Image: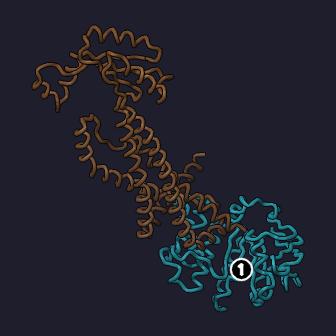
Chain colours: A cyan, B brown
Amino acid sequence: MLRFEGVGKRYPGSGEVLEALNLRIGRGDMAFVTGHSGAGKSTVLRLAALIERPSRGRIFLNDRDLTRLPPRSVPHLRRRIGLIFQDYRLLYDRSVFDNVALPLLIAGYGPEEIDRRTRAALAKVGLAGYESRRPITLSGGEQQRVGIARAIVTRPPLILADEPTGNLDPDLAQEIFTMFRGFNQLGVTFLIATHDRGLVARFASRWFHLERGRLVAEG
Amino acid sequence: MRGRLRTWLRLHGHALFSSLGDLWRAPWMSAATILAIAITLTLPLGFGLALVHLQRLSDTFADDRGVTLYLSPSLTDDQARRLAARLRRHPAVASLRLTDKQMALAEFRRDPYFGAALDLLPDNPLPASIDVVPKPAWADESHLQALVAEWRRLPEVDLVDWDRRWLRRFRAGLALVRRAVWLLGGILSLAMVLVVGNTIRLELQERREAIAVMQLLGATPVFIRRPFLYAGFWYGAFGGGLALGFVFLLFLALRSRLTELAQLYGSPFTPYFFGFGALCAIWSGVCLGTVAAAWLTVSRHLRSRQS
């Protein structure tokens, strides 16, 4: 489903963040990228979502070469990928409902469809009844669940999650990953960046360990 | 196709009203921007209206190329007609009109202010006159001067009046003022565009994070731009409307004075406001300007953030 071929990334003024990275993630995988901070985990996800472009190499999503995708096609690509962030990145001046509905609004769904899907997504993450709450009044775990509802509401085949439980205590992390596994069993492919090897051991079907921009182990 | 149209309408409807809601949620900033636009536009619109009036006034005056020959009072009507016939053959004359003593008297009697004064006089004091319109080739200043000098020497002519020179000066001045008003209008329209651009820029700063998130969720530049374009439209709609309101208030305040002044000069001229067509054109022009300003500002912002 997602394939990196000899991908390198360097930022002006700093060295190589990624060096000739090859990785392959199949449909239905629950894949993890691990490593210390600065190992290039986040960069892998940012490249897959075309938030950044690689300096070298090629990235394929469903056999489509993302490195050749013109900028105007990037928004349409992003609509088919669910993104989950460590710091949630919710809009704090809007209600929980509006936050989750945003991808549907962007994709041009009708009001009934938006209402139905948004409520369904909130129910799936256990936040039914939270529709009119403001994100700021929620706990960290609840905010991340709003973020997850927003990522799954368009039913994307691929979800990229960057340290999704980095700000949460272990119990909550466990809960969130159990939720991910549920979605994964319904056929959603996951690529998750984390430094928590314990989670990898328990949940991963594939994993890639990076050190200073190089792939040093995989399984 | 119908589905796409519905989607399009829904997105635009949503943006139209949500942007109005955003304006309402920041009432002071919106009011300040709208007022700034209105005040900026009131000045050139007011001058523009004054200019239209001056133009109308200028149009009520007769042709500025005309020359009037007042004939000597001792001349008989017959002699006057012979002179007129002779002048009609003059190579410089396009047309002329003879007003004999009786016609002059009748015309004068119609004047509401001075007509009655004639009754006090024993006989008709008014001379016959000939209004001459020269051919266009002879109508410039130097040719007219030569013609006037020639006709002054005629024994039948008492007086040559071509004081319509003031009208030519008036019209030249008017052309200058018109250009100045257009220039002023251009500069102040630019000011309006900058005011709107600044306001939109502030809103962009405020919604930086929201815009970044929307881009991550697959929002196209069109989607992100849309609410700002509608905000621009609302600024123009309210600001332009308010400016026209201000000009109308000014007009109301000055109308009675203007009417009075015009009556004192015996002019048929009455003050009037912009017509419906002009109002629509001005208002749409303002809206177009503010939408364009918003478009430029957001596009620049999005370009500068593209990595």
Horizontal relation, residue A203 to residue B154: left or right: right
Q: Position of residue B114 (x, y in %)?
A: 17, 30
Which residue type carries mark 1?
Asp
Q: Position of residue A40 (x, y in %)?
A: 80, 81
Q: Quadrant of residue A59?
A: bottom right
Q: Badge 1, how many Cα within 10 Å: few under 14, some, many 20+? A: many
**Above or below B81: residue A83:** below
Would residue B284 be visible to someone looking at this image?
Answer: no
What residue is shown with label 1? A162
Horizontal relation, residue A4 to residue B8: left or right: right
**Above or below B227: residue A158:** below
- Residue toward you, B265 or B187: B265
Q: Position of residue B54 (x, y in %)?
A: 37, 41
- Residue toward you, A199 or A214: A214
Would residue B171 be visible to someone looking at this image?
Answer: yes
**Above or below B120: residue A25:** below
Horizontal relation, residue B49 to residue A179: left or right: left
Quarter of the picture holding the N terminus of chain A: bottom right
- Residue toward you, A16 or A32: A16
Total labels: the figure holds 1
Q: Secondary structure at mark 1?
A: strand
Q: Quadrant of residue A5?
A: bottom right
Q: Quadrant of residue A77?
A: bottom right
Quarter of the picture holding the C terminus of chain A: bottom right
Please tell me which residue is depicted at 57% across the width and 66% down the height of the picture. Answer: A117
Chain of the residue displaying label 1: A
Q: Position of residue A112 (x, y in %)?
A: 52, 60
